[in-house]
Image: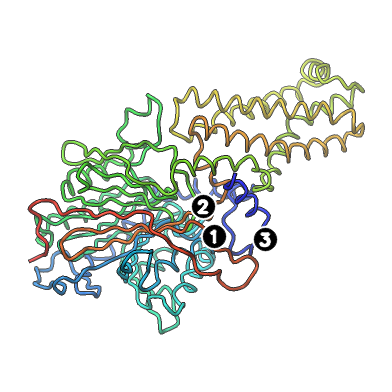
Amino acid sequence: MKELLRLLWDSLRLERRDGAMVRWYEVPLLLRMKLVEVVARRLGRWSDPRLGMANETRPVFYDLRSGEVRTVDLDSPMLALEAAPGRPLAFDYIADTGDGFDSTYAVIRASSRRDLRLGLSEPLPDAPTLVLGGDLVYPTAGRAEYRRRLLRPFHHAATRPDALKHRDVFAIPGNHDWYDGLRIFRRLFCEGEELVGPPALSWRTYQRRSYFALRLPMGYWLLACDFQLEGDIDARQLEYFESLLSSPHVGVDDRVILALPSPVWQRARQGAQSRRRRFPDARFRPRVDHLMGAVIGPKLALAIAGDNHHYFRYANDDGSVQAVTAGGGGAHLHPTSHFRLDATLPQGDGDIKLEARAAYPDASTSRKFGFGNVIFFIRNPNFGLLMALVYCVVGAPVLLTVHATGGFDLGAALTRLLAFVDPLLSGAWLIAIALFLWSYASFTTSTNALTPTRRRVIGLAHGLTQLSVALLLTRFAVPVYRDGLLSLLALAAGGWVLGSAVFGLYLTLTFQCFGLHPHEAFSALRIADFKSFVRVEVSDDGGLRVWVVGIERVPRSGLRGRPPSDPEPHLVDAVEVPRTKGARKAQA
């Protein structure tokens, strides 16, 4: 009940339009997103900017061991440069930013704060390096969206008195960053620009490609990949990582932190047919599978990704391999309740088995939030316009038949429509009904839960329910409004409210009972809370220390022109990744 009241309050609260969470169920946005996605995928297949970046730039990695960023050619000779003895290095990983201003600002504000205290005996180490894990803006990439949804909260957070003034920023793109062909991403992150500032600040970028490698102290490397829109790295990218890991710069006992745009290890609870595959859509990721299993292999210490907007951690038995989903950088919340509690990562000729260790929010809280779509119409009033149109398409021919014949019996009207009035009209109506039911049956194929047949049956039941409600509205609209236009307006108004209500009830029941539509259900809720980021420290003993910082309630700015109050971060999870036996603690 507390979660439902929170959503209801957020629905009634006034907010600045330019800082609001993306309203995914606005009809123009739905149509535009589908068009943009189709065009971007077609163009991405014909012209891949990753190839251009690889041809225009030499293969390099970035050495962070001295506390400053040094660009090193892959074919350069070995140097005896090493970081100061015992000097750790920390970086923050933040993914899925750039949705609402308040949520993005809260995460960046907490990340950039010096001496961040979380109720521990000592503050966390400062993180002068920031790694952005993809999907930096929503809904699509563009100059205005980057400025409004990413750079503006970055600037406000960086200019606070206790914020870090100098940060080295690296980023990989997600699918939303690719919707403009990576044009703005390249300009911001691949041309050495300063992201924020007056001149006193220095949040600098260094990379020249959309993927990169960072050399960290104590024999650690961070490799960051770019999946484009096809869910896999390209051949030149794989060649780059193979060349790096086979070069003299990488020692035998070095370990790897792998950053991916999406968590290929995280799987929803699936039906028997879908469970046979190692990964969802694994057939589209052969190079990533090869990179993790054959190229990196036993060097892997930590795999981290965004894309799912929550925190979820898996680990093997001894904790030496961790797989973390950390997409809490500002985008609307995704649930954690529908994922399997086991996972696998390829290594050599086999797999590493992992078990779930932590989630934020927990599964119980996710399920409670899932009931929020009972107020779907309040949260997404504009979606009702689409349902009003659908109901009019279904009911208008019946209304016309009733008014033309002067009868008010719905069954008789349907009989006249199909058999006597106008074969062309009745045929078009039947085609519209068939398309209507087919679209609802097909809507469930976007999820991996259950078998395809069961999903389509559930979707068809939803379509039949909407059809029944539309015909019942038609039945009651005719006797009340004998004028045809008034009857049609009454039908549209009923479709606006009841159509949205039925759709929200469908999302609620299918998510709670079958685990269907987790992303569709939670994008409708637009939950700005339960944000998080990950701070990783390469410690002086050669291990990794990982802290997950959460923000349960994001402060709101409302209609004010200034940023909201400071968030209250807390510790969600902490883990130490041990160095494997025989691994050296420092690069000689």
Viewer-proximal residue among 389 and 463: 463
- Residue 156 versus residue 427: which sits nearer the camera? 156
Q: Residue furthest front?
A: 121
Instruction: Please tell me which of labels 2 and 3 falls first in the chain.
Output: 3
Task: Look at the numbered disc 2 and give the secondary structure of its residue.
Answer: loop
| Residue at (35% x, 68% y) in the render | 169
Q: Are marks 2 and 1 in contact (CB under 8 Å)?
A: yes
Q: Residues within 10 Å of mark 2 (few under 14, many from 20)?
A: many
Question: Under tag 1, what secondary structure?
Answer: loop
Viewer can see residue 59: no
- Residue type highlighted by circle 1: Gly
Left or right of 302, for residue 159: right
The one nearer the camera, 191 or 537, is: 537
Q: Position of residue 92 (x, y in %)?
A: 34, 63
158, 556: nearer the viewer: 556
Q: Residue at x 79, y 31 (%)?
A: 396
Q: Is mark 2 in CB contact (under 8 Å) with mark 3?
A: no
In the orientation shown, which residue stands out farthest toward the bottom?
200
* Residue highlighted by disc 3: 14
* Residue 550 picture location, percent across and down: 42, 57
The answer to which image quadrant residue 77 occupies is bottom left
Q: Residue 55 in the image: x percent, y percent? A: 27, 61
Q: In this rendering, does residue 229 appear at all?
A: yes
Mark carried by residue 100: 1
Secondary structure type for disc 3 = loop
Position of 438 compared to 494: left or right? left
Q: Earlier in the sequence, mark 3 or mark 1?
A: 3
